[in-house]
Image (spheres, rainbow, N blue to C red):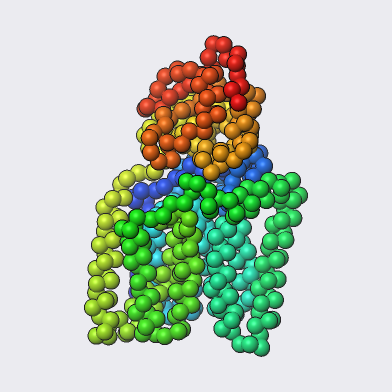
């Protein structure tokens, strides 16, 4: 028992060290959105968000208690990762055995990092509830499975893919209880969804939620121009390689582990339409279970699979080694020196809660400088948002009404997301603001002497 505890402690300690020294991704939205909520802004009504809100509410409460900042974001993220560690170990121990659980914990610690897990996004948070739904399904506790799946769904809409393996498990249960189990599952789902809908209705944001999270987020966004981002062949091969373990696992152990593949696949479907490694996060626990189940048995020592096992292990070492070398001591993404300098400049040239406007630069500047956006509702300056009819006109109306004392403008580029110009807003800014100075290449604009003389070039 002491040896087991030592190994577990060593795995977690090494993971914490890696989390601390490998690059952390502080997505600007994870600072801005909860920060605005702590300032009394309502999601959807005052902030255009295409995702469901449970994680943002949770993070907003955390910020309200401990303050807003990059350190707080890191701590919140690492708590979630360590919580997932605990669930992976406990679930593997109860469904398989201690040896499998220890291997699964170690494997999860590695691949969770590899798939851009050192940073908070909706997928990481949602994956915890998806993992719990897997456990309750395996334990035939269908009411609880429905409850936690619904929590996953109100954390991120891509949880809908987990209904596929849940349905598979239902179909494979005994015929005499399929109807009863389905009723319990639906009851659990409806209980959470009903309370959620009632809550956002009472807060008066249901119409805005429907517009941004349902109509836009589910129906329009996946096919929006510029939103679809398919992987390069190299990235596709690299991201798929660890999942090859399911081939020998199912070949050697038969149908009993097929459901693991279905759960892993459902967790990975969030990579479409916008391919990013962090979208694999909900799939990583099931990948860890699959690898642990394979290597905790004797099938990997079989002559037919031994060569594959050796090549697989070497390939995994190569992939993680490359990842480690490119991310070690690389600091915090979206909190580089130039971001810090711009935030410091804005903070020293404004008063708390002053309104500014950030264009083509990281929106965490608002939170880091203690200022507020000059437009309400705040809308991301991405083509699939600002090209919606009427959005830029509302932004211009907000700028005219608030007359921000500073506009932060990062010069537009020729390629990538930073090449997109919200033309109407940009024209308005050029007509009414002029360059004061540059901070690390980022332009600081102030009102022209005859500001708003010809103000609205709509």
Q: Position of residue 120 (x, y in %)?
A: 48, 51
Q: Position of residue 85 (x, y in %)?
A: 45, 65
Q: Position of residue 373 (x, y in %)?
A: 58, 32
> In which quarter of the view is residue 352 placed?
top right
Q: Is residue 86 visible?
A: no
Q: Indicate whether 370 appears above or below 224.
A: above
Q: Is residue 188 visible?
A: yes
**Toward the viewer: 240 or 145?**
240
On the picture, is 448 further left or further right than 203?
left
Residue positioned 59% across, 40% down in the render: 388
**Toward the viewer: 417 or 156?**
417
On the picture, is 6 further left or further right than 314?
right
Residue positioned 36% across, 85% down in the render: 252
**Toward the viewer: 288 or 390?**
390
Residue positioned 37% across, 27% down in the render: 441
Q: Indicate whether 357 appears above or below 281.
A: above
């Amino acid at each position: 028992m002491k040896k087991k505890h030592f190994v577990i402690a060593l795995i977690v300690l090494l993971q914490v060290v890696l989390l601390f020294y490998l690059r952390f991704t502080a997505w600007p939205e994870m600072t801005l959105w909860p920060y605005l909520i702590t300032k009394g802004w309502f999601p959807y009504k005052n902030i255009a968000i295409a995702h469901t809100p449970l994680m943002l509410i949770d993070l907003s409460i955390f910020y309200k208690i401990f303050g807003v900042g990059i350190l707080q974001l890191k701590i919140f993220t690492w708590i979630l990762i360590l919580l997932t560690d605990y669930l992976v170990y406990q679930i593997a121990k109860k469904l398989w055995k201690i040896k499998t659980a220890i291997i699964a914990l170690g494997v999860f610690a590695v691949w969770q990092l590899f798939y851009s897990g050192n940073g908070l996004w909706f997928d990481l948070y949602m994956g915890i509830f998806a993992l719990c739904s897997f456990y309750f399904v395996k334990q035939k506790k269908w009411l609880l499975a429905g409850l936690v799946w619904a929590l996953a769904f109100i954390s991120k809409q891509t949880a809908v893919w987990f209904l596929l393996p849940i349905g598979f498990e239902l179909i494979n249960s005994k015929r005499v209880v399929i109807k009863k189990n389905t009723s319990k599952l639906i009851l659990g789902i409806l209980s959470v969804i009903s309370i959620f809908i009632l809550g956002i209705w009472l807060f008066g944001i249901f119409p805005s939620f429907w517009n941004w999270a349902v109509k836009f987020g589910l129906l329009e966004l996946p096919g929006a121009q510029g939103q679809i981002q398919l992987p390069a062949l190299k990235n596709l091969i690299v991201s798929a390689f660890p999942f090859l373990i399911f081939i020998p696992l199912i070949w050697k152990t038969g149908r009993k582990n097929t459901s693991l593949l279905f759960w892993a696949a459902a967790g990975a479907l969030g990579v479409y339409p916008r391919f990013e490694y962090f979208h694999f996060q909900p799939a990583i626990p099931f990948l860890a279970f699959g690898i642990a189940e394979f290597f905790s048995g004797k099938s990997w020592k079989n002559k037919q699979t031994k060569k594959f096992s050796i090549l697989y292990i070497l390939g995994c070492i190569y992939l993680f080694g490359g990842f480690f070398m490119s991310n070690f001591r690389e600091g915090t993404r979206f909190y580089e020196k130039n971001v810090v300098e711009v935030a410091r400049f804005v903070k020293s040239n404004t008063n708390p809660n002053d309104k500014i406007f950030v264009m083509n630069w990281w929106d965490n500047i608002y939170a880091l400088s203690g200022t507020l956006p000059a437009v309400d509702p705040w809308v991301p300056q991405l083509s699939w948002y600002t090209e919606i009819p009427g959005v830029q006109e509302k932004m211009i109306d907000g700028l005219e009404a608030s007359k921000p004392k500073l506009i932060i403008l990062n010069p537009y580029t020729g390629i990538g997301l930073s090449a997109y110009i919200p033309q109407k807003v940009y024209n308005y800014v050029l007509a009414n603001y002029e360059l004061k100075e540059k901070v690390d290449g980022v332009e600081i604009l102030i009102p022209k002497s005859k500001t708003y003389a010809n103000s609205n070039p709509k």
